[in-house]
Amino acid sequence: MKKKLIWAIMTLLFVISGNSVSAENTIDWGMKLSLKGELPGKWKGDNISINMFKPGMGISIGAVADIYLGKKFYFEPGTSLFYSSYYYKDLIIQGVDGTTDQRDPKLTKYGLEIPLLVGYMIDLSDRYEIDVFTGPQLRYAFAGKIDIKKEIINGDLNDSFDLWGINGQRRFDVSWKIGIGVPVKTCVLSLEADLGITDLLKNDISFRENRIGFSIIKFF
């Protein structure tokens, strides 16, 4: 059901943008850099809610196309490479020899994200405006790991901390992005928030990732 909804949204946005571009013929291309605060949600299940993680940081860089739709609306698809990290909270892992332990290991991911945003330009005066935008963002993690000391990882313990294993996380993620931007000459500075939609865990516990960030787009 979620996949059908995502494809329906993508198809609708591309049809709208295609019809508008032929009329307006206005497309601006740019590079986007984002710095993010990673805010992992709680693990939730039957009558339980566990704050399993501490916040972390992330970064992404890529390209966007700003497609004018008319009447101050625009469609802004993009693609970026991302890096994200956050930490376990109050977790102590003890080695098989009983003498080595590790506290709050870091979880890291690398991958591709594709935002599909629709925005609206609000004129504050003859010289100033702000942009408000929203839309889905698709994410796929190419690689990821939990940073654990070599002295601790051994046999079954190694399998338990496989990020993509049977009891691990899903690589594909969908979030809903909202934000506000301020054009400054050939750049746009924006504050953004990603609200997690996809349940990333492959078991009876649910878990979603959220993030807030600051972005700059340089148009050419």
Image: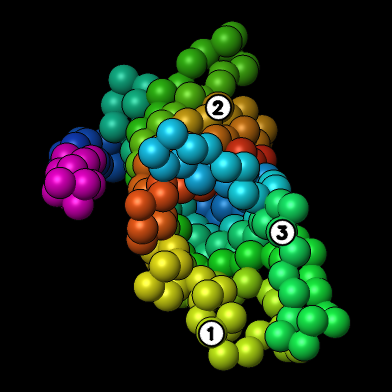
Cα gap from disc 2 to disc 1, whole angstroms: 47 Å
Seen from the viewer's position, the closer of residues 62 and 98 is 98
Residue shown at the point (48%, 24%) measured from the top left: 132
Of the residues shown, which amino acid type is indicated by label 3?
A: Leu
Report the magenta residues as a range: 1-14
Q: Residue 180: which disc? A: 2
Where is residue 135? Give x, y as percent.
37, 36
As for residue 8 lying within the magenta part, the answer is yes
Residue 11 shows in the view: no
Q: Which residue is at the far front?
A: 98
Going from N to C along the chain, the mark reached first, 2 or 3, is 3
Q: Residue furthest top?
A: 125
Q: Which residue is mark 3?
A: 91
Question: Which is closer to the viewer, label 2 or label 3?
Answer: 3
Q: Which residue is mark 1?
A: 156
Q: How far apart are labels 2 and 3 at the CA level?
A: 37 Å
Neighbours of disc 3 within 10 Å: few (<14), some (14-19), many (20+)? few
Residue 185: where, in percent of width, then height? 65, 35
The crowd level at tag 2 (other Cα within 10 Å; few <14, some 14-19, many 20+) is some
What residue is at 39 percent from the left and 38 percent from the top?
A: 46
Magenta part, dominant SS:
helix
